[in-house]
Structure formats: structure tokens, C-alpha cells
Image (cartoon, rainbow, N blue to C red):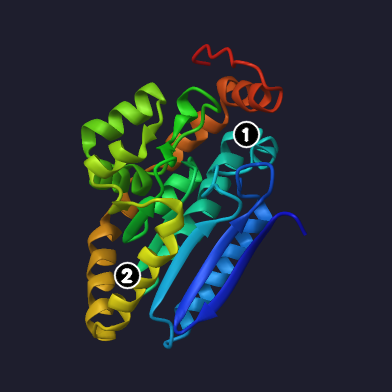
Amino acid sequence: MSEEVRASTDAGVVTVTLSNPGRRNAITRDMYAELERVLTDAAADRSVRALVLRGADGAFAGGTDIRWLQQIRTGPQGVDYEADMRRVQTRLTDLDVPIVSIVEGACVGGGLVLAALSDIVVCTPSSMFGSPIARTIGNTLSPTSIARLSATFGRHRTAEMLFTARLFTADEALAAGFVNDVVEPDRIEERLAGMLDAIRACAPLTLRSFRILWRRMDAVLGEIEHDDVYREIYGSADFAEGVEAFLGKRRPRFEGL
């Protein structure tokens, strides 16, 4: 199977690897379902001390596989799609252990959201961060995702990222506070191992309390009305044009319709 989510456990650490060769680890519908299952299992296992998210073959994740978005033809279908995204993301935020994202290469779209929902992000110098959907696909982000990006990148940098569709470098992400450290590829495993050792040395219940309280602070964002926005965006001609243009490898012609 070429498109997969691999999970392994070692010394209380669950490592989740996204793999979709040749597509910068774009996340398919089946991959999201498997990711949800893995996260649910990790949440139920009290022996887990941390979870690591990473991508295969020199990339983190290139967002949702656009072939799935091609199936969305109406506003209500877009609402259902966003509900699926929220359910998977909730499985991640429901974890009571620290989440570490190891980013190499592209971290965009849905991949950027996964990193933003993590507690610690370490990347390599070649990493790039962004959500260029306003230029490419013409869909939108959830209130929770926008809020988390604003909190981690800063409101003004997030506005530049979303309104201009530009990608940020590893050094820019570090300066913004989105990334904890930029490490050369040959040192990334050493840096991760040291971080996990430090986590294991801490009181599990204390770390759990931090995650629970942060989750309660974020919960209010889920009350923001959003389905009307999703219906308008995913039911628009611009969204259909964006998906078709992306798959056809051409520039989209957006008309605000």
C-alpha cells in the first residue's frame, strides 16, 4: 500500500508517519481514517508518554489529497468534509500527552494544521510552511485552525500567510514562534531523542494537566458558527474551478462566484 499511516511504539512514545510517495505525503481519505484510529488507540493507552508526528521521504504533509476534494460538489458536502477534518483534529487535541511534530520539507495545508495543533515543532532548514489555498484551491480553514495559527504564527503573520498565499521559511517560522528549533537533517534524531528523554523525566499527571487545561481553553472556539461559511465556499464555482485547475496543473481563474 503506497498511501498509508504507519504507527510504532517504543519506550512509551508513539511515532506516527504519514506516507504518500510522490505527492508530498498528501493525506487521502483512508489515511485520515487510519490517523483517527491510531490517535484513538493512543489516547486509550495510559502507558503512552508522548506522540511524534512526521512524514516520510523528506516531506511532512502536503495537505488533503485534492482527489478527495474533487468529490465535493455542494455546500452541504463541504460541511460534511469539514466535520470529518474536525473529528480527526479533535482526536489529536484530545490526547493527554505532549505532541511533537518533526517537519522536513513541505508543511502546508492540512499538514500545517497538524503541526499547529502540536505542542512542539522541530524542523530542518529546508522546511516550508503555509496554507496557499486562496491561490490554489479556493476552500477555507476552520475557526480552530485559524485561531491556532494566529496563536502560533502571530495574527499579522497568519494574515499575510492566508491573504497572500506565500510560504514561510524555516527561519521565519522560528522567528514567529511556530517552530521551537531548526536543526540540520543529520541532527534531527538526536534532537528528538533528547526532547523525548526530557518529557519522560517529567511527571505524567502534570503534563496531562497542561494538555487538559489547554484543551478547555481552546474549546470555546468550537462554538463559533461556521457551517454557513463552509456551505458558501464549498458550493461555489470558484472552489470547483480551483480543484479542477489544481488537478489539471493550470492556474485557476477565480471570479468570486
Q: Name the element at disc 1.
A: loop
In the drawing, does residue 83 fall left or right of residue 67? Answer: left
For the residue pair 139 and 103, the one nearer the viewer reads as: 103
Q: Which residue is drawn at 61% across and 48% down?
A: 25
Residue 225 placement (x, y as % from top left): 36, 44
For the residue pair 56 and 194, the one nearer the viewer reads as: 194
In the drawing, does residue 19 fall left or right of residue 255? Answer: right
Are there few (<14), some (14-19), or many (20+) residues within 10 Å of tag 1?
some
Q: Residue furthest right?
A: 1
Q: Name the element at disc 2.
A: helix
* Distance of label 2 from label 1 (alpha carbons): 45 Å
Tag 2 residue: 195
Q: Residue at x 48, y 40 (%)?
A: 109
Q: Residue at x 61, y 41 (%)?
A: 77
Kindly identify the amino acid type of the residue bearing the numbered disc 1. Thr
Residue 156 placement (x, y as % from top left): 22, 31
Residue 97 seen in this snapshot: no
Kindly identify the amino acid type of the residue bearing the numbered disc 2. Met
Q: Select label 2 or label 1 by which is in front.
A: 2
Compared to residue 20, the image places residue 201 above or below, namely below
Question: On residue 129, which mark appears?
Answer: none
Residue 89 seen in this snapshot: yes
Q: Which residue is drawn at 35% across and 49% down?
A: 144
Query: In the rendered view of the protein, which quadrant contains the N terminus?
Result: bottom right
- Image quarter for residue 249? top right
Are there few (<14), some (14-19), or many (20+) residues within 10 Å of tag 2?
few
Residue 219 placement (x, y as % from top left): 29, 60
Tag 1 residue: 74
Residue 223 placement (x, y as % from top left): 32, 53
Q: Looking at the image, tell me whether mark 2 or mark 1 is earlier in sequence order.
A: 1
Compared to residue 156, the image places residue 122 above or below, namely below
